[in-house]
Amino acid sequence: MPRVLITTEVLRDAPGTHVDLLQATGYEVRFPSKSALLTEHDVLEAAQGSVAIIAGSEPYTDRVLAELPALRIISRNGVGYDRIDVPAATRRGVAVTITPDGNHQAVAEHTMALLLAVARSIVSGAIDTRQGNWRRRSVSIPLRGKTLGIVGMGRIGRSVAVRAAAFGMRLLAYETCPDREFMNKYGVEVVGLDQLLEQADFVTLHTPMTPETHELINARTLMRMKRGSVLVNTARGGLINERDLLEALTSGHLAGAGLDVLATEPPPRNHPLLALDNVIISPHLAALDEQAVEDMATGAARNIVDIFAGNWPNAALINPAVKEVWNA
């Protein structure tokens, strides 16, 4: 019986439609014994003999792929795939898929939650109240009438735009291939990155992590942002130079930041951003609401079943060139 490994932490040892689908199609489902985020060694130990993996954020390097000769599919439970060496996967005949429709609304909701939490000092206020300090330490920043700059207008960016429009925000977007029909419908103005940073009261990042976008937010671009503005990141930690962000926050140039992702996850306990009252950090859980978890897991399982049945999920397939060398 062919084996499928499920590594995603939130799905470990959990029943669900995704497990039912795989088992009903003739696959044996297994889970890693380790409960934390897997290392290269952990992946190699857990994935031997697996023909497919429903993958989380663990690394799939060329070394890992070379030592998993039975592997034919890495089905990401989500949309980010920067931890997968896609060229190496293609060379070795391993299909890489994502679940593009599974989590964009969940991430958009979390983005708005972080934006509101920072703007209204909700976390620090809640902590003060719990400690018996009934004080209103600052005046909140309103959303209505303010400008939101959205960097990256894929599914998540567009979902954020819909929600921000309902708050009465002016919308700017930095996007190389904009959906003009959507932009016109929601009144989104497409501008250059510098213009967006200079005009936005809030900036939210929704671009993939690539060599071109690595540390897109750095000392230069942070200084382009308006004094007193807020930065939100629910995409990838590597989009931000954290040392430069720390300087912008401690100097008062930025009013605050809401981060669901960091360059190193989990962060060390002495990470300087954790000590700032004007920073809210959540543990990379923006995509993990009940509906999104179910939709992503089922989509990831469906991608595996479809490919082995000869039905390529083209909208979810990251490396279409693999079709030329793929062999079940």
Image (cartoon, rainbow, N blue to C red):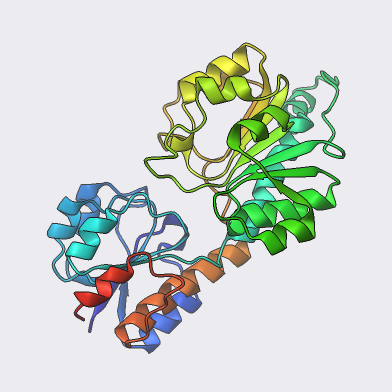
Count how many numbered circles sit on residues in the image: 0
Occupied quadrant, residue 186 = bottom right
Relative to 183, say whether 18 is above or below.
Answer: below
Question: Residue 136 vs residue 156: left or right?
Answer: right
Q: Can residue 193 be seen in this view?
A: yes
Q: Is residue 187 left or right of residue 319?
A: right
Name the image quarter holding the C terminus.
Answer: bottom left
Query: Relative to 264, does residue 67 appear above or below in the rendering?
Result: below
Residue 122 horizontal/vertical position (percent): 76, 33
Query: For the point 39% across and 55% down, which residue is it?
Result: 81
Residue 272 seen from this side: no
Tell me the quarter of the picture where residue 228 sits: top right
**Vertical placement of residue 45 versus 121, above or below:** below
View extreme (top): residue: 251
Residue 20 shown left or right of residue 111 in the figure: left
Q: Position of residue 278 (x, y in %)?
A: 67, 23
Quadrant into which the N terminus falls? bottom left
| Image-quadrant location for residue 320 | bottom left
Q: Position of residue 137 (x, y in %)?
A: 82, 18
Residue 238 position, x and y percent, is 43, 36
In percent of the image, x 30 and y 83: which residue is there?
308
Q: Is residue 322 left or right of residue 211?
A: left
